[in-house]
Amino acid sequence: MNISTRFPVAVHTLILLSISQPGTATSDMIASSVNTNPVVIRRITGMLGRAGLVEARAGIAGARLKKPLAEITLLEVYKAVNAVGEGGLFAVHESPNPNCEVGRNIQAAMNPIFISAQRAMEQILEQTTVADVAGDISQLEGIVLPDFFAPISR
């Protein structure tokens, strides 16, 4: 199972909200940057809003951050957008042959490994902020934006 693209799109959205002028970060503008439909952005923004990361009101142009990027961990975003479906990041095929020694034991052998791997990934996400990602983007672009990590005051 893959992590849903909602996760990187949500991070993308949060960074755009942090660097956009008030009222300009509309779902159309963000969708243009992400290269998706504005409805997808509105859905993700709603999820981020329910998680307390952004404030967005229907019919009013532009959402806004509720806290600085440096205070938003990637784990918060990951959880906010339900990045992984039911059952976790990894899955073992559901119906292995019970008459085969490998088939009847593969799930029991692999599940502890998958649980440990998911925990390790989540620990890294918990230690990394959206500001860290924004900083990496800034560095890759060779730009310095003075208020890159702070929400724009409204």
Image (tube, rainbow, N blue to C red):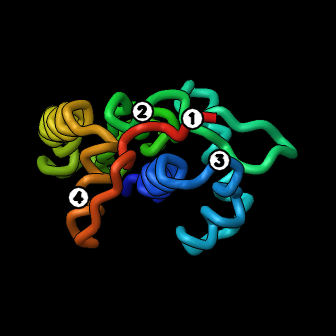
Mark toward the viewer: 1 or 4: 1
Residue sitting at x 53%, y 31%: 53
Q: Looking at the image, is mark 3 or mark 1 earlier in the sequence?
A: 3
Please state the horizontal and vertical placement of residue 21, each as a whole percent of the image: 60, 53
Q: CA distance from mark 3 to mark 4?
A: 24 Å
The front one of 86 and 11 is 11
* The N terminus, quarter of image: bottom left
59 lies above or below 4: above
Q: Looking at the image, is mark 2 or mark 1 earlier in the sequence?
A: 2
Q: Are marks 2 and 4 in contact (CB under 8 Å)?
A: no
Q: Badge 3: how crowded within 10 Å, few (<14), some, or many (20+)?
A: some
Please give the residue where the numbered disc 3 appears in the rendered image. Answer: 22
Q: Residue furthest right?
A: 59
- State whether residue 89 appears in this view: yes
Please state the horizontal and vertical placement of residue 90, each as a whole percent of the image: 30, 46
SS for tag 2? Answer: loop
Mark toward the viewer: 2 or 3: 3
11 lies above or below 36: above
Q: Quadrant of residue 108?
A: top left
Please state the horizontal and vertical placement of residue 8, each as a whole percent of the image: 42, 56
Q: Amino acid at mark 1?
A: Ser
Please give the residue where the numbered disc 1 appears in the rendered image. Answer: 153
Mark number, residue 68: 2
Q: Quadrant of residue 38?
A: bottom right
